[in-house]
């Protein structure tokens, strides 16, 4: 079961400290100023993200800055349509009318460096600019994207601040910059469909820096008993926005699986392009997990536990799952840590006799949050 975390962290920091309260949709709340918040903010990393994001929005008023952002996002340095804020700061010195003094630029750089360094109690976080459906938007522009401030050259950029918490509606507050350099909250929420027609910059933490795709243990021989290699074949979800809000971009899944004897695999599987899972499509993964031998070490039942990974959370929680007794082995429990922003998706056991893909009737595991199929090959 996923414990949905709405977005109080987003709303709570949008008002001045003198009148801090949750957004209730009143007219007085429709102009939010992302001012620095106090050290009492529960997650100081998220508080700093807002401060950095406000500065980025200010910089985006400069045509050179926007052009450089577009050029960097097009590179897809980590596979998604984003760029690290740190990368953009390296270009500021060469820009004319950067809309920010040298002193302000240095203060911004220090904020970014502090987040990326982490502390004894907080993880390392890498602020980024993510532009959903960037290539689609670019293809619809008549002129170079660098010459425009929005999709049509007239529309302002809309800014969304993503703290890693999915909203049930998958819609999030949006802001535009007014003539006075202040962020004004829009009177409507921003959906993924909106981002296909309008230019939206999501200020968030990158989820892939230090990302390592885990591999199952290697085998020294090809000998196997009624088995071979066990692979995650495909994954699917009934509601993509429920496990990974659109501001987060592509999907990062974490898997822990074990026999009644020991853990067989624990780590991330390759990043899945968001469009591959949209509208309940099955995304093909074909990721090797382990060699399944029906010996006492592996048994005939393997437990799988899945989590969707999000950055932005500094607090940890423990997930525990159980492998039932089988093949002469007693039942046993295993644990692993996730952050408070991660989404625990599903636990289920896989049995050796289950039909595998890509046959006509493979076993489909999981629940509405995440389904998956296995395959077994030489």
Image (cartoon, rainbow, N blue to C red):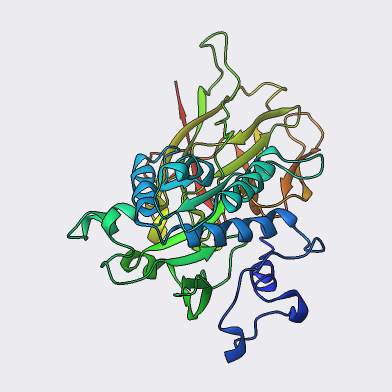
| Residue at the spot 42% in from the left edge and 53% down from the top edge | 277
| Residue at the spot 62% in from the left edge and 40% down from the top edge | 255
Q: Is residue 323 visible?
A: no
Image position, residue 102 (x, y; %): 55, 49
Q: Nearer the viewer, residue 220 or 35?
A: 35
The extreme left residue here reads 142
Is 331 positioned to the left or the right of 152 in the image? right
Is 82 positioned to the left or the right of 346 in the image? left
**Image height of 22 relative to 196, above or below:** below
Image position, residue 204 (x, y; %): 56, 54
**Image height of 192 relative to 233, above or below:** below
Q: Nearer the viewer, residue 275 or 216?
A: 275
**Image quarter in which the N terminus is found:** bottom right
| Residue at the spot 59% in from the left edge and 53% down from the top edge | 104
Q: Nearer the viewer, residue 148 or 354?
A: 148
Q: Is residue 176 visible?
A: yes
**Image quarter in which the C terminus is found:** top left
Image position, residue 96 (x, y; %): 39, 51
Snapshot quadrant of residue 144: bottom left
Q: Nearer the viewer, residue 124 or 231?
A: 124
Image position, residue 35 (x, y; %): 65, 68
The extreme bottom residue here reads 27
Total of numbered circles in the picture? 0
Is 120 positioned to the left or the right of 2 in the image? right
| Residue at the spot 74% in from the left edge and 56% down from the top edge | 44
């Amino acid at each position: 079961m996923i414990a949905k975390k709405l977005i109080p962290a987003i709303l709570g920091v949008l008002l001045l400290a003198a009148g801090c309260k949750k957004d209730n949709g009143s007219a007085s709340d429709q102009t939010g100023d992302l001012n620095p918040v106090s050290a009492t903010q529960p997650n100081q990393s998220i508080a700093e993200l807002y401060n950095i994001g406000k500065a980025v929005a200010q910089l985006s008023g400069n045509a050179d800055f926007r052009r450089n952002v577009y050029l960097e996002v097009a590179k897809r340095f980590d596979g998604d349509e984003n760029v690290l804020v740190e990368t953009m700061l390296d270009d500021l010195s060469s820009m004319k009318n950067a809309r920010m003094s040298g002193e302000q630029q240095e203060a911004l750089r220090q904020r970014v460096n502090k987040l990326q360094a982490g502390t004894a109690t907080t993880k390392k976080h890498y602020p980024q600019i993510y532009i959903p459906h960037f290539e689609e938007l670019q293809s619809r522009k008549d002129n170079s994207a660098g010459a425009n401030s929005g999709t049509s050259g007239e529309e302002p950029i809309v800014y969304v601040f993503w703290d890693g918490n999915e909203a049930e509606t998958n819609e999030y507050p949006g802001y535009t910059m007014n003539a006075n350099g202040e962020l004004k909250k829009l009177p409507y929420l921003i959906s993924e469909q909106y981002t296909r027609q309008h230019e939206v910059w999501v200020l968030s933490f990158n989820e892939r820096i230090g990302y390592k795709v885990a591999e199952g243990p290697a085998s020294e021989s090809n000998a196997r008993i009624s088995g071979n290699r066990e692979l995650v074949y495909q994954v699917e979800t009934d509601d993509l926005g429920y496990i990974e809000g659109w501001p987060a971009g592509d999907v990062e899944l974490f898997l822990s699986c074990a026999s009644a004897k020991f853990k067989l695999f624990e780590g991330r599987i390759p990043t899945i392009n968001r469009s591959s899972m949209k509208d309940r499509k099955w995304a093909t993964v074909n990721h090797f997990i382990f060699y399944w031998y029906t010996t006492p070490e592996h048994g005939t039942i393997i437990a799988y536990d899945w989590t969707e990974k999000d950055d932005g959370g500094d607090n940890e929680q423990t997930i525990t799952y159980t492998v039932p007794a089988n093949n002469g082995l007693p039942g046993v429990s295993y644990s692993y840590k996730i952050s408070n922003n991660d989404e625990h998706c599903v636990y289920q056991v896989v049995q050796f006799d289950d039909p595998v893909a890509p046959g006509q009737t493979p076993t489909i595991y999981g629940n509405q949050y995440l389904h998956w199929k296995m395959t077994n090959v030489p």
